[in-house]
Image (spheres, rainbow, N blue to C red):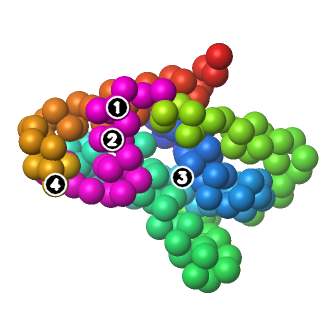
């Protein structure tokens, strides 16, 4: 793994873990698998990310959301990208599970609630509801660029809040 991807991982793993953990009922083992596969797919497809379509974290949350839906349907977390990349299976020990639990304990809902209304709406609609920037802008009567800016600022603020809880 190159240094750029390692920095990318460190920058986003907290938010992705908090997002996933909320959706798997606090099951650290399941959250670990989904987060690992999310970043494996991101590594595998990193050349496909288009910053014009949205921030990195929105892309990662989209990958995680799709993995969660697939895992619910299949009743297991797919490890295809990890296998294709030749990654060895990870043995979870108590320290690894504790690290997931710490990241999962971040108050994502509280951090979202603390965002200014316009940023929160833009982040929720773009990242969680997967609405296009164009559709969001049209529905609230502003430009697509304004929505992009709100999403970007909101996600940056979320990351700072979750990385440095008070």
Q: Is residue 146 above or below residue 132?
A: above
Q: Measured along the vertical axis of the image, is residue 105 above or below residue 91?
A: above
- Majority secondary structure of magenta residues: helix
Furthest residue toward top: 166
Q: Magenta stretch containing residue 115, yes or no?
A: yes
Write down the region rendered in magenta: 114-134
> Could you tell me how far apart the alpha carbons at marks 4 and 3 are, in whole angstroms?
28 Å
Q: Please name which of the two marks, 1 or 4, marks the residue nearer to the observer.
A: 1
Residue beneath the point at 42% across and 43% down? 57
The label number, if any, that marks residue 117 in the structure image: 1
Mark sitting earlier along the chain (4/3) = 3
Position in image of residue 20 (x %, y %): 60, 54
Q: Is residue 84 visible?
A: no
Mark linked to residue 152: none
Q: Residues within 10 Å of mark 1 (few under 14, many from 20)?
A: few
The CA distance from mark 1 to mark 4 is: 18 Å
Q: Which mark is residue 121?
A: 2
Q: Is residue 147 left or right of residue 160?
A: left
Name the mark on residue 39: 3
* Residue 113 place in picture, x, y as percent: 49, 33
Return the x and y of residue 34 as percentages of the image width and height: 62, 60
Q: Which quadrant of the rendered structure holds the C terminus?
A: top right
Q: Secondary structure at mark 4?
A: helix
Mark whose residue sits in front, 4 or 3: 4
- Tell me, yes or no, whether the two marked residues, 1 and 2, touch with CB atoms within 8 Å: yes
Residue visible at 27% across and 56% down in the picture: 131
**Crowd rating for badge 4 (residues with CA inside 10 Å; few <14, some 14–19, many 20+):** some
Which residue bears the numbered disc 4?
A: 135
**Circle 3 or circle 2, nearest the eye:** 2
Considering the numbered disc 2 on the image, is that residue within a helix, a strand or a loop? Answer: helix
C-alpha distance separating marks 1 and 2:
6 Å
Name the image quarter holding the N terminus.
top right
């Amino acid at each position: 793994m190159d240094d750029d991807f390692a920095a990318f991982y460190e920058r986003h793993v907290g938010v992705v873990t908090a997002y996933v953990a909320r959706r798997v009922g606090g099951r650290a083992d399941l959250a670990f698998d989904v987060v690992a596969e999310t970043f494996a797919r991101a590594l595998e497809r990193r050349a496909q990310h288009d910053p014009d379509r949205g921030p990195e974290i929105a892309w990662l949350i989209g990958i995680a959301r799709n993995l969660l839906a697939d895992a619910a349907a299949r009743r297991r977390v797919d490890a295809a990208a990890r296998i294709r990349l030749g990654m060895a299976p990870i043995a979870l020990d108590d320290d690894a599970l504790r690290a997931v639990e710490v990241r999962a304990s971040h108050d994502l809902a509280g951090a979202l609630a603390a965002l200014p209304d316009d940023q929160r709406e833009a982040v929720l609609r773009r990242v969680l509801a997967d609405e296009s920037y164009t559709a969001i802008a049209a529905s609230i009567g502003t430009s697509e660029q304004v929505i992009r800016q709100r999403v970007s600022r909101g996600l940056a603020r979320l990351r700072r809040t979750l990385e440095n809880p008070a």
